């Protein structure tokens, strides 16, 4: 659900977009996710995403808050 949000922000399309690792933290009022996403079949290039889903009576769609480009599969997924 956040792929189109990232593509719009960076003005680039990603034909490959596969979550490799996801860390979740549930806080009062919402869930925060750190996600490492593979964006290439031929290299180990990844992006790191910080996504929030607000919990309300009608849960909102996940929202891409921050991202880091030019990451590698071996790079640790840490809060940013």
Image (tube, rainbow, N blue to C red):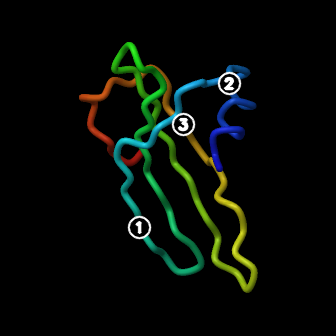
Marks 2 and 3, how far apart at CA: 10 Å
Give coordinates of residue 34: x percent, y percent: 43, 51
Nearest to N terminus: mark 3 or mark 1 = 1
> Residue 2: horizontal and vertical position, in percent?
64, 46
Q: Is residue 25 above or below residue 36?
A: below
Quadrant location, the C terminus: top left
Residue tagged by mark 2? 10
- Residue identifier under label 3: 67
- Decide: marks 2, 3 in contact (CB < 8 A)? yes
Horizontal side of 30 relative to 24 (left or right) equals: right
Q: Which mark is residue 25?
A: 1
Q: Residues within 10 Å of mark 1 (few under 14, many from 20)?
A: few
Residue shown at 64% from the left, 70% from the top: 54
Q: Secondary structure at mark 2?
A: helix
Q: Is residue 24 above or below residue 59?
A: above
Task: Assign a secondary structure to mark 1.
Answer: strand
- Residue sitting farthest toward the bottom: 57
């Amino acid at each position: 659900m956040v792929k189109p949000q990232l593509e719009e922000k960076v003005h680039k399309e990603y034909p490959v977009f596969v979550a490799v690792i996801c860390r979740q933290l549930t806080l009062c009022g919402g869930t925060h996710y750190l996600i490492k996403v593979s964006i290439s079949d031929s290299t180990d290039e990844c992006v790191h995403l910080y996504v929030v889903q607000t919990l309300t009576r009608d849960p909102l769609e996940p929202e891409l808050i921050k991202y880091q480009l030019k990451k590698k599969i071996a790079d640790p997924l840490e809060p940013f």
